[in-house]
Image: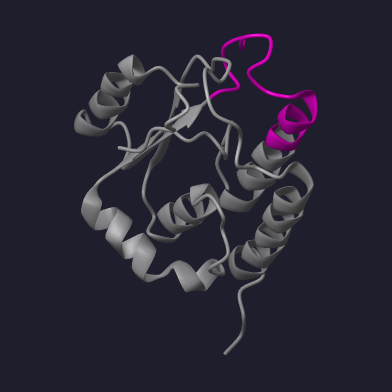
Amino acid sequence: MILDADLTTPPETLPKFYHALASGKGDFINGSRLVYPMENEAMRFLNLLANKFFSVAFSWLLGQPIKDTLCGTKVILRHHYEKIAANRSYFGDFDPFGDFDLLFGATRLNLKITEVPIRYRERTYGATNIDRWRHGWLLLRMVNFAAHRIKVPLVA
């Protein structure tokens, strides 16, 4: 189980993720902050736009709807995680947060990705580690790199 430590996602939602995995609804359970209304200061407007862009890009890349690529709440079985981590270099080993690595890796392993909506709250303490422009550019490069691996396979 992965949960951001800033408490923007209430820990009380974790049982929903566990039940989705345990009941076989998915092999990789990904949170989605973009379903329910958010608290006013939970996400900056440009971050929201970027999240929606990456949602569309990933839905196209992965061939299935993905509403939120950067939610920090996820559940995956350890052996699936270890396989993804062992093959991280396939999609480029430069994901600063791990979210894209997990989504690309889960797709490559043909895991069933299921999203669980969460209520996203305003950060209660600490400061974000995200540099909007620098990390946004890096994430765009990752999408481009992965597109060449997924949509334009290399001919041997």
In the rendered image, residue 18, in percent from the top left (x then y), is placed at 25, 28
Identify whether 79 is placed above or below 27. Answer: below
- The mark total stands at 0
The quadrant in which the N terminus is found is: top left
Q: For the view shown, which residue lies furthest in the bottom direction?
A: 156
Q: For the view shown, which residue lies furthest in the front direction?
A: 126
As drawn, is 71 to the left or to the right of 105?
right
| Identity of the residue drawn at 35% across and 17% down | 13
Magenta span contains residue 125: no
Nearer the observer, 101 or 63:
101
The quadrant in which the C terminus is found is: bottom right
Q: Which residues are magenta?
A: 33-51
| Identity of the residue drawn at 51% across and 47% down | 99
Identify whether 8 is placed above or below 54. Answer: above
Nearer the observer, 130 or 83:
130
In the rendered image, residue 101, in percent from the top left (x then y), is placed at 49, 56
In the rendered image, residue 73, in percent from the top left (x then y), is placed at 42, 32
Nearer the observer, 124 or 99:
124
> Quarter of the image holding residue 84?
bottom left
In the rendered image, residue 57, in percent from the top left (x then y), is placed at 69, 46
| Identity of the residue drawn at 62% across and 63% down | 146
> Quarter of the image holding residue 20?
top left
As drawn, is 35 to the left or to the right of 114?
right
| Identity of the residue drawn at 65% across and 42% down | 130
Q: Main secondary structure of the magenta part?
A: loop
Magenta span contains residue 36: yes
